[in-house]
Amino acid sequence: NAGVMQNPRHLVRRRGQEARLRCSPMKGHSHVYWYRQLPEEGLKFMVYLQKENIIDESGMPKERFSAEFPKEGPSILRIQQVVRGDSAAYFCASSPGTVKLNTEAFFGQGTRLTVV
Amino acid sequence: QQPVQSPQAVILREGEDAVINCSSSKALYSVHWYRQKHGEAPVFLMILLKGGEQKGHEKISASFNEKKQQSSLYLTASQLSYSGTYFCGTENRDDKIIFGKGTRLHILP
């Protein structure tokens, strides 16, 4: 059973371009969480999705950022018109149920986005 | 609301003990502890759900106080492999884990 798969591991974009980050949850997991991590800082919650639904996007910037988790395929975090401040590591985590049911979340290896 | 972790950083010699604290201004539903090594994914350690609960994982254990506003992670007889950043995450029945800023632990041989 493969773990949470994120790709690409490293992504370089010029200012103004679009960044697409992919996350394939563990088999059987239908809950996906996205976090952003700046160097030497904690994991900042961005969005929580279930299949085809955004449950909580309270941590997502209102503009340029969007996320989806289609019925088929990976979850996508999309950042339009990237700026230097978007440079960070983006982690995806998945769980088989909601974390309030005492289930652990498994993290992927992250995508390190660098905006030049 | 982000939980507060203390200390921010700890340097120990191999074999020494450490305690990492995580606190909230409000009662929590659960606390999740993770360890992250540099450049790697956070790895799950344990979840605490009940007030007064204690859990162990070899020489790493944790407690959740009765009021469910504070949790502590205990590392006993630390090993070099314990080095990393420890995060506590709190969940308040809203289906998401909010993490503290982390505690960096460095073990010297």
Image (cartoon, coloured by chain):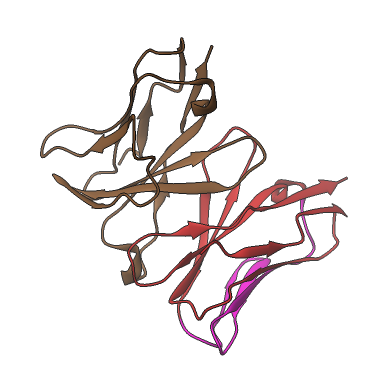
Chain colours: A brown, B red
Q: Position of residue B54 (x, y in %)?
A: 58, 81
Q: Does the rendering let one see residue B13? A: no
Q: Quadrant of residue B71?
A: bottom right
Q: Does the rendering let one see residue B94? A: yes
Q: Position of residue A94 (x, y in %)?
A: 33, 48
| Front in this rendered view, residue A12 or A109 | A12
Q: Residue furthest left?
A: A71
Quarter of the image for the C terminus of chain B: give it: top right
Q: Position of residue A105 (x, y in %)?
A: 39, 54
Q: Quadrant of residue A7?
A: top left
Q: Residue at x 39, y 40 (%)?
A: A61
Q: Specify whether B65 is left or right of A60.
A: right
Q: Position of residue B90 (x, y in %)?
A: 49, 66
| Front in this rendered view, residue A16 or B97 | A16
| Residue span colored magenta | B50-79
Residue B76 sits inside the magenta stretch: yes
Q: Specify whether A29 is left or right of B66.
A: left
Q: Is residue A22 above or below residue B24?
A: above
Q: Specify whether A64 is left or right of A42.
A: left
Residue B31 sits inside the magenta stretch: no
Q: Quadrant of residue B87?
A: bottom right
Q: Residue at x 73, y 47 (%)?
A: B83
Q: Is residue B50 above or below residue A1?
A: below
Q: Is residue A52 above or below residue B38?
A: below
